[in-house]
Image (spheres, grey):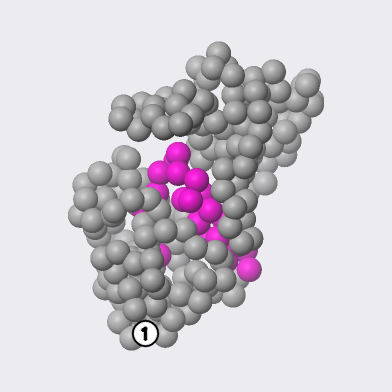
Amino acid sequence: MSCFYCASCGQKLFATADVAAKKRLMQMPGYSLDCYVLHGDADLSRLKHRDEDFLNEVWSCCRISLMRLARGGEAGQIIAYADNLAEAPEGSPPPALVPEYKSRQLTEDDFDQVMAEGALPENKHKLYVVKFTALWCPPCRAMDHVFRRIKAAGDLPDVEFFEVDSDEQQDLTDRFLAPSVPYIIFFKNGQRMDASRFVLSSVNGGLSQAVCEDEFRALCHKLLAVEA
């Protein structure tokens, strides 16, 4: 018997007895996302609960999320994303936390100020990457993985990553016409950049789907080379 913890904050989420199955949700070069399918009676009362009404229910502690679809072929299933879980035998101490890079979260209150800071002399050469995201979105998690790997490699020091929770910041999401999540927009020298000439999957100048690390690195290099 094992217990599963959030690898980011250490909170216990569920145990082996709560697991009905494990399956793969998505696969892309350099990244795969598995999930645990939980029994419907799993006790999730310790987690924050958010009901999206028309789409799904979400339970979360910090960055990990569990989701129950409200519609679709597998409606009613509760899934727990495996990419930020830590497992330990029942009765043992939780695994040691491993700090990971996290994009800075922006809200309606500070978005414009932060983007304007990109025009300061010390930041004029930097590329600001803003991802509109949602806790329940598997492709968003794929892009989180890409951002973490880029930051860990340290070879793109002039790229800064930010994110906006589309469910909580609906005004910002509407303002930038985000068609879905993930949706990624770019700023340089305080000005929004148009990425449509560099990628096929572009809507309103932003990147409108998850891409692999190599493709995203190449896009960042191209945008860094553009005079804003």
Q: Give the magenta-colored segment's residue range.
A: 129-153
Foreground pick, 195 / 22: 22
Is residue 148 covered in magenta?
A: yes
Rendering coords of residue 178 (x, y %): 28, 54
For the point 76% across and 30% down, the residue is: 88
Q: Residue furthest front?
A: 73
* Count of numbered labels shown in the rendering: 1
Asked if residue 137 is positioned above or below residue 128 in the image, the reply reads: above
Q: Indicate the secondary structure of the residue bearing disc 1.
A: loop
In this rendering, would 188 be left or right of 108?
A: right
Asked if residue 70 is positioned above or below residue 183 in the image, the reply reads: above
Foreground pick, 5 / 174: 174
Q: Is residue 219 visible?
A: yes
Foreground pick, 55 / 124: 55
- Residue 127, by quadrant, is bottom left
Q: Which residue is label 1 attached to?
A: 226
Q: Residue furthest top?
A: 41
What amino acid does circle 1 point to? Val
- Residue 145, by quadrant, is bottom right
Q: Residues within 10 Å of mark 1 (few under 14, many from 20)?
A: few
Query: Which quadrant holds the N terminus?
Result: top right
For the point 62% across and 32% down, the residue is: 36
Is residue 138 covered in magenta?
A: yes
For the point 53% across and 60% down, the residue is: 147
In this rendering, would 182 be left or right of 171?
A: right
Rendering coords of residue 75 (x, y %): 45, 27
Predominant SS of the magenta segment: helix
Rendering coords of residue 125 (x, y %): 40, 80
- Residue 83, by quadrant, is top right
Rendering coords of residue 170 (x, y %): 25, 44
Query: Which quadrant holds the C terminus?
Result: bottom left
For the point 57% across and 38% down, the residue is: 81
